[in-house]
Image: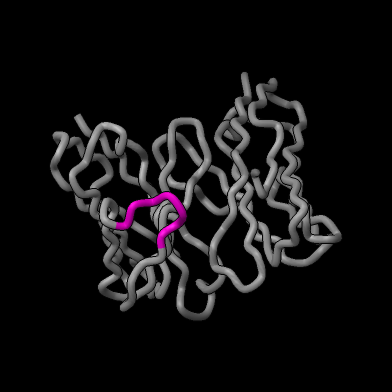
Amino acid sequence: GAVVSQHPSRVICKSGTSVKIECRSLDFQATTMFWYRQFPKKSLMLMATSNEGSKATYEQGVEKDKFLINHASLTLSTLTVTSAHPEDSSFYICSAVGTSGWYTDTQYFGPGTRLTVL
Amino acid sequence: TQLLEQSPQFLSIQEGENLTVYCNSSSVFSSLQWYRQEPGEGPVLLVTVVTGGEVKKLKRLTFQFGDARKDSSLHITAAQTGDTGLYLCAGQMSGSEKLVFGKGTKLTVNP
């Protein structure tokens, strides 16, 4: 149980284009999902908290117009990197917290998406 | 200022040796979690500790939560090459769903 998937696992795009990353909780419902960014050999940096049916809450220093988050259902959150630039290249990881039972109070992480902007 | 100080940042040992990784904070956490991450993958939860003084064992891994719930340690006995990876501690404060991550410990176990 507690499987979180991300799609795509890797994406390469040209500078100026937009990229959408999906995060799905496969066997549980999640009212809250988190988006992290991780640089090589570094720890995870929280970008934003995504709540189903409401606007995402962004951490200080994260541009909400640059990183668009949509939590459309209890099993899906998307992160769109708009007008991507090489400095946006990173490993993006999502996590999900379950709504009830066994899956509450614990963040389960997806496998990550490697974004490379040329 | 790093809320959760994790040490050491890098550790390279021989197979069979023991090691301890520490996470320290001046803040109190309602729970603390340890994750292991392989390159190119997401973190995988190893354990969650919630009670001050709690000790949990997972095969050769022993996790301890400090009495005041401000610090935690991970001890690995007789390390194996398969233990190689990035170990992350993450604390959750009361009333918040957010996790505060330590900087991680990159462990390399050499054959």
Residue B4 rendering spot, x and y as whole percentages: 67, 48
Side (left or right) of B83 relative to B75: left
Residue B27 rendering spot, x and y as whole percentages: 74, 57
Residue B107 vertical position relative to residue A47 in the rendered view, above or below: above
Count how many numbered circles sit on residues in the image.
0
Main secondary structure found in the magenta portion: loop
Side (left or right) of B59 relative to A26: right
Which of A81/B33 is in front? A81
Say which residue appears at 65% left-offset and 31% top-offset. B9
Residue A103 rendering spot, x and y as whole percentages: 50, 72
Side (left or right) of B96 relative to A87: right
Q: Is residue A60 magenta?
A: yes
Q: How is the image coloured?
A: one colour
Please state the extent of the stretch shown in magenta in the rendering.
Answer: A58-64
Residue B54 vertical position relative to residue A111 in the rendered view, above or below: below
Asked if residue A1 shows in the view, the reply is no
Which of B52/A70 is in front? A70
Point out the image quarter for the C terminus of chain B: top right
Residue B86 rendering spot, x and y as whole percentages: 56, 36
Side (left or right) of B5 relative to A7: right
Say which residue appears at 78% left-offset and 56% top-offset. B70
Q: Is residue A6 magenta?
A: no
Say which residue appears at 62% left-offset and 73% top-offset. B95
Which of B62/B32 is in front? B32
Point out the image quarter for the N terminus of chain B: top right
Residue A94 vertical position relative to residue B20 in the rendered view, above or below: below
